[in-house]
Amino acid sequence: MNMNRQKINYFIIFIHFLISGIVTISCIESEKSIIQKNDQYSSEITFNNAPSIIKKNNSTINNSSEEFLKISDQEIIKIAACVDMQVPCNANREQAAKAILFMGNSQNKLFIKPLIDILWIENSFKDIINEALNKLTGKYFSIASEWESWSVKQDFLQMPDNYVEIKSEIYSKIDKQYSKIIKNEYNTHIPMETLKWIGASAQVIPEINSSKLISSNEQNYLKDDDLIIGINVNGKDYAYPLKILRWHGIINEEISDKSFVIVYCPTMNIATVFENKPVGNLSLSSLFLDQQCLMQNDDGVLINAENGIYNNGYKQLKRMPMIQTTWKFWKTYHPNSKVLSKDTGYLIDYNDNEIPYWISIINPKNIELEYVKYNQNSTYNSLVQYEYQGQSVSHLLYRVYDYRIIYDNFTNQKILTIIFDNGIGARTFLAPPKEITQISYTNKNGWLAKDIDNIYWFISSNGLINQDDSSFYSEISNYISIKT
């Protein structure tokens, strides 16, 4: 009796599992058919957000793949970005979405960077663009800046042929200045296809014009180890702190009828000073060549912030002598110096612990390079660099513990570089005939250099002066950069 009841129970359980299995399989098949129905465009990937944009017209969707196969990559990008279209963008939304779907399923890596460019400007398509990029890269990020930060590290990324014109139109949707920059006849030496962008207007990084300068005793915001750019104009000293410059990149200055520009590129820790009368007021553009900052003038001409080259590589801004050093060093040896006021006209706190967001896009490691420790074991070390007779020369600044006087030999001239202040600052000069063997400082005479004949040379604001016969050897402008 009990045995028969037990058999009946087992039979009931078996029937229950059998029915459940049939129901489950039916549900799976039903769900599979729904997926297949909704994914007639691609059997490889379902773009979950596409149905709300693309009308459910099976023939239209099926034919779109063949349609895009018949046209060039450039035309597909134009449709996706609504660039150079004969119809208004609102009327082109469905076709644009289909183009994005096609790009995502194409396995064509040339579409990656254009999709990122479109993502910057087309927020309503962000979901399907993110899915398309995920399909092409195997990565997933949610916003354009994250994709841009990832893309700047990918050496394999290339652009479609003749992409410059399309790139110009995409960027111009945010700011018409980009069309002036990218199509500029004087910018043809710059590979526009490879430019990095921070997804903002062309002049989003605000330059400082006609800065407010105060005495060193008036300022109360600088610490001893804050870095500054120090210059001398007509015998007077001026200091420009990097904690302010990293937010602006450019200070257009005019002192004693001398027009110049103080430049700091925080993504590469390069500081220099140029005469800028030939090109007018400058600002950092929001376009970068790898991590190199590019300056721009009002006419859209791009100028390399490191070397001052512009006009298709045929012209170069003239450098002015400068030194990058600590505030403690500068105020000690230049007590009468003027310093940039924190009152710049912008509502920025210039806090030590904050950096502009765009730096992290171009330099994904997000390192405040201006505060790198200058020692031999550091991953990052500073270089002093200069150019002479068409040659570029560089020396590691941490070598201050080994030497402070560096000679470079050219065909008919020796060049002397003197390192100051624990390897942070340096100046470069045409070298006197007798070898310099010692550097010292006195409160009365300032910095002095002594040669092998025990003759002293004054290290003046713009060169070396012999104390006996007043012979003069001029300074060669240099700049500080990071070696990684």
Image (cartoon, grey):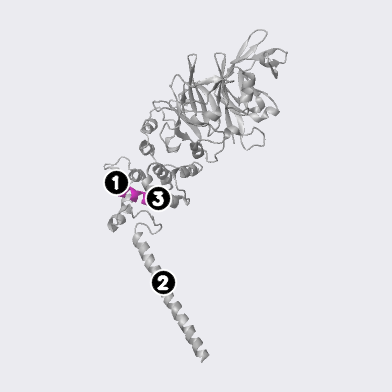
**Residue nearest the viewer, comparing 41 with 208:** 208
Above or below 202: residue 332: above
Residue 235: quarter of image: top right
Q: CA distance from mark 3 to mark 2?
A: 32 Å
Q: State whether the magenta stretch is mostly helix, strand or loop.
A: helix
* Side (left or right) of 114 relative to 434: left
Element at badge 2?
helix
- Residue 264 position within the rendered picture, expressed as x and y whole percent measured from the top left: 52, 28
Q: Residues within 10 Å of mark 2 (few under 14, many from 20)?
A: few
Q: In the rendered image, which residue does mark 1 sit on? A: 92
Which region shows up in magenta? 91-103
User: How many numbered marks are there?
Assistant: 3
Residue picked out by circle 3: 127
| Residue 100 belongs to the span the image colors magenta | yes
> Which mark is first along the chain, 2 or 3?
2
Seen as rendered, the residue at the extreme bottom is 1
CA–CA distance in space, label 1 to label 3: 18 Å
CA gap, disc 2 and disc 1: 41 Å
- Tell me which amino acid carries mark 3: Asp
Q: Do the residues bearing badges 3 and 2 touch, measured as CB atoms within 8 Å?
A: no
Looking at numbered disc 2 in the image, what kind of residue is underneath it? Ile
Residue 160 or 13: which is nearer the viewer? 13
